[in-house]
Image: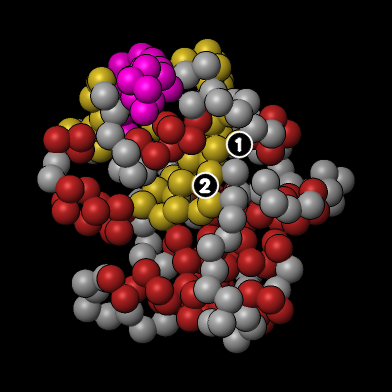
Amino acid sequence: MIELGDIGKTYTRPTGDSVLALSDISLRIERGEFVAIVGASGSGKSTLMNIVGLLDLPTAGRYSWDGEDVTTLASNRQAEMRNKKIGFVFQAFHLLPRTTALENVELPLLYSDRKSIKDLSRRALEAVNLTDRIHHRPSELSGGQQQRVAIARALVNEPDLLLADEPTGNLDRTSALEIISVFQALNRAGRTIVLITHDREIASFAGRIVRLERGRLVGDERVAAPRAVTQEAQ
């Protein structure tokens, strides 16, 4: 599905100095995988997510999606791919405070060219086990429930890929494990998930762990039996 070949990213500071954020990243992600990308602050993991999510372009290397070099596409075509093929979940929930859970989830559909959007928002909330809170505003929801609304919003356009950047970073442990349980259920249903985290315990619930250090890939391990979120884990 996704293939990165020798990806590099260099930023230029206002002083003119260059900062190397990523160097020689080669990575292949198959459809249906649950991949955790792990690294400390400054390791380049969010930069990598931005490139995979077509929010930024590499300065070196090739990024292919189903065999197509997406780095050479026009910006409007890249935006179309982001809208149709990729769902984003962030550490901050980015919910509109005066709208209900259902209305927050409906927002991406305003930019969709789908012929029918009936019940898509409700089905997305059902996928994250939140149908009993569809008319609640964010202030009436716990942190974990707010993140589930954000996940439902990312799912509503039925994307091929779900990208999650530190989605448990603002949550207590119980709520964090609830979110990981949602991701595992979505993955079992066939969703491709890439999770960015600094937390090795959170990463242990994925089926594959990719480690970054100082902008370089230093580890890529497939997990034969990923941890399940059980009552004991909580």
| Residue drawn at (64%, 32%) of the image | 198
Q: Which residue is mark 2?
A: 164
**Image height check: is 207 above or below 110?**
above
**Quarter-of-image position of residue 142:** bottom right
- Image quadrant where one finds the N terminus: top left
Tell me residue 116's x, y (percent): 27, 80
x 60%, y 86%: residue: 135
Amino acid type at mark 1: Thr
The residue wearing badge 1 is 197
Which residues, given as a range, are shown in magenta? Answer: 1-26
> Considering the numbered disc 2 on the image, is that residue within a helix, a strand or a loop?
strand
Packing grade of label 2 (10 A; few <14, some 14-19, many >=20) is many
SS at badge 1? strand
36 and 170: which is toward the camera = 170
Q: Does 123 sit above or below residue 51? A: below
Image location (x, y in percent) of residue 48: 42, 31
State the colouring used for the structure image.
Answer: secondary structure
Asked if residue 189 is positioned above or below residue 194 in the image, the reply reads below
91 sits left or right of 27 in the view: right
The answer to whether the residues at label 2 and label 1 have Cβ atoms under 8 Å apart is no
The residues tagged by marks 2 and 1 sit, at their Cα atoms, a distance apart of 9 Å
Q: Residue at x 39, y 39 (%)?
A: 50
Question: In x, y percent, where is residue 210?
Answer: 53, 24
The amino acid beneath tag 2 is Ala
Label 2 or label 1, whichever comes before in sequence order = 2
- Residue 66 falls left or right of residue 100: left
Q: Nearer the viewer, residue 79 or 126?
A: 79
Dominant SS type (magenta): strand
